[in-house]
């Protein structure tokens, strides 16, 4: 399980874009680093992140080794009614993680 | 007049050698020597990467461990509120451990003696997560050095190390962190060398690390042989640094370049 | 004749060695990212407008560089940003990340923390609905580069 978390505002207005913030704990090994014996440390990165709101995809990303360790990404979403926002991620070894938040919509 | 001034200066020098060394003034935490982006990152309650270790620590806190199958929470409470004020008092004297210990050693003492589990490895994710979690409970509190007499020997040793020139570069901690704080080394501002925001996420390591790891990196920086993790010298240095940083407010876990 | 061959051989060896070194991941001279951009645009020429790339002017540590991209767009079904692609021309692997958006986003704005191997130009390509493309470059000074540092102690 890859640890991570997601943040949405406490409450959002219907139809108004709100920022979704995601932070994932992962070394994001580039494959260029060497250990103390001089051996290359193998590539190991989170390469896919996707987000759904009330079951519909709102965002998707592909990461390369150029994304920082403990990757951070933020994007915008809109909601017409309250629902569960789910962010999931997977790495190049098949390990996965997810985090979710409840989006509370106040009337516009 | 000149002779009087010279004698005065001579006397002042010798008096200083016998009493406490002058502290940097004003006392400034390491965050003040970081760039705007790092300061923003440390202040960001969600986006501070060190918080990932705090979150993991909060989970590990509730995990039963060892032969006694006890979690930290079973003695110390589920939310770690009882840890408020603890990390800022470390390194501290623990009689049962026979001397001064730092926070990571204290955590491991609990893990082995009270939980009956094998000690967590230095710089392991588990130990760092617990250390980050415990330290975060003291955020906003001032460093309170352990005043017990039993700490005096460690303090004296730490102070001696701090003022001792070492390594191929033949530098003592004081040469940079007292005489040159605020000046630039390799285009980066030199800090006053305080321990208040540690453990910290270091961009260079791309991970959270302990104060001991940071001190070892300083030894490497002057091309001196690094003391082993848990060595009495590193703890002694931490004891001196804690007293030197007395009153500085902790923002642990911090973010550094 | 022999001497010339000798020096030619040395030169060839040096060239081979340097290209082998490059394959291991080095701060590259600026690479031509046009072919990478073309993989996405398939020949369409991106317009240099509407893409705002926010990066620090001076970066303390190339391991974690905060990036914010804003693309001007109404984000409607008819007119929206489909994807944002980030390129770093001097990184060992110039394609940094791709972010896929849609009308449900409401705003074409993405933030991330990226690695930069050294001072260079970062290029952001926006893929819009209707086969349109926008592009925006941004120069960054990096004092301590990523990707190459073996700091683990």
Image: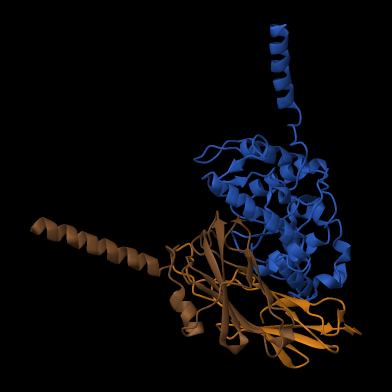
Chain colours: A orange, B blue, C brown
Residue drawn at x 54%, y 49% is B220
Q: What percent of the width, then of the height, locates residue B35?
A: 67, 53
Where is residue B46? Give x, y as percent: 77, 69
Q: Residue at x 13, y 61 (%)?
A: C5
Could you say which quadrant of the image residue A82 lies in?
bottom right
Q: Quadrant of the C terminus of chain A?
A: bottom right
Q: In this view, does B236 lie to the left or right of A29?
A: right
Is B236 positioned to the left or the right of C29 in the image?
Answer: right
Please state if C13 lies on the left or on the right of C125 as rendered. Answer: left
* Residue B230 visible in this rendered orientation of the protein: no
Question: Residue drawn at (78%, 50%), measured in percent from left and top?
Answer: B92
Q: Which quarter of the figure has residue B72?
A: bottom right
* Snapshot quadrant of residue B1: top right
Q: In this view, does C104 lie to the left or right of A47?
A: right
| A41 lies above or below A83 | above
Residue situated in front as seen by the camera: C49 or A57: C49
């Amino acid at each position: 399980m890859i640890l991570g978390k997601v943040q949405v505002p406490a409450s959002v207005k219907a139809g108004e874009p709100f920022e979704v913030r995601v932070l994932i704990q992962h070394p994001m090994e580039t494959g260029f680093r060497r250990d103390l014996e001089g051996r290359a440390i193998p590539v190991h990165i989170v390469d896919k992140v996707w987000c759904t709101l009330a079951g519909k995809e709102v965002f998707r990303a592909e990461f390369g080794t150029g994304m920082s360790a403990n990757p951070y990404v933020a994007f915008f979403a809109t909601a017409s009614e309250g629902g569960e926002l789910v962010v999931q991620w997977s790495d190049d070894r098949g390990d996965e993680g997810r985090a979710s938040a409840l989006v509370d919509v106040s009337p516009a | 007049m000149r002779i009087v001034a010279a004698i005065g200066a001579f006397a002042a020098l010798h008096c200083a050698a016998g009493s406490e060394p002058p502290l940097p003034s004003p006392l400034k935490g390491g965050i003040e020597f970081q760039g705007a982006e790092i300061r923003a990152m440390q202040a960001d309650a969600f986006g501070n990467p060190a918080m990932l270790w705090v979150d993991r620590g909060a989970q590990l806190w509730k995990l039963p461990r060892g032969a006694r199958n006890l979690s930290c929470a079973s003695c110390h409470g589920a939310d770690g509120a009882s840890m408020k004020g603890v990390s800022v008092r470390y390194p501290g004297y623990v009689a049962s451990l026979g001397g001064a210990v730092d926070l990571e050693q204290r955590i491991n003492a609990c893990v082995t003696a009270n939980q009956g589990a094998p000690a967590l490895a230095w710089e392991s994710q588990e130990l760092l997560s617990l250390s980050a979690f415990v330290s975060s409970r003291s955020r906003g509190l001032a460093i309170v050095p352990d005043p017990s007499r039993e700490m005096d020997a460690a303090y004296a040793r730490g102070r001696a190390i701090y003022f001792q020139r070492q390594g191929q570069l033949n530098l003592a901690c004081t040469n940079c962190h007292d005489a040159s704080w605020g000046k630039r080394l390799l285009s980066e501002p030199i800090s006053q060398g305080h321990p208040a925001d540690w453990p910290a996420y270091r961009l260079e390591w791309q991970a959270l690390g302990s104060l001991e790891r940071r001190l070892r990196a300083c030894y490497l920086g002057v091309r001196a042989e690094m003391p082993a993790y848990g060595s009495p010298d590193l703890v002694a240095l931490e004891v001196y640094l804690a007293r030197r940083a007395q009153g500085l407010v902790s923002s642990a876990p911090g973010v550094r370049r | 004749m022999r001497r010339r061959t000798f020096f030619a051989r040395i030169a060839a060896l040096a060239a081979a060695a340097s290209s082998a070194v490059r394959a291991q991941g080095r701060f590259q001279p600026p690479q031509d990212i046009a072919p990478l951009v073309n993989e996405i645009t398939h020949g369409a020429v991106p317009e240099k407008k509407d893409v705002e790339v926010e990066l620090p002017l001076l970066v303390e540590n190339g391991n974690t560089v905060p990036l914010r991209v804003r693309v001007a767009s109404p984000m409607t079904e008819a007119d929206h940003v489909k994807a944002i692609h980030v390129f770093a021309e001097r990184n060992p692997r110039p394609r940094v990340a791709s972010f896929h958006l849609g009308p449900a986003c409401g705003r074409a704005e993405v933030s991330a923390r990226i690695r930069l191997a050294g001072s260079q130009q970062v290029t952001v390509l926006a893929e819009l609905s209707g086969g349109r493309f926008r592009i925006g470059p941004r120069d960054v000074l990096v004092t301590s580069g990523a990707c190459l540092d073996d700091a683990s102690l």
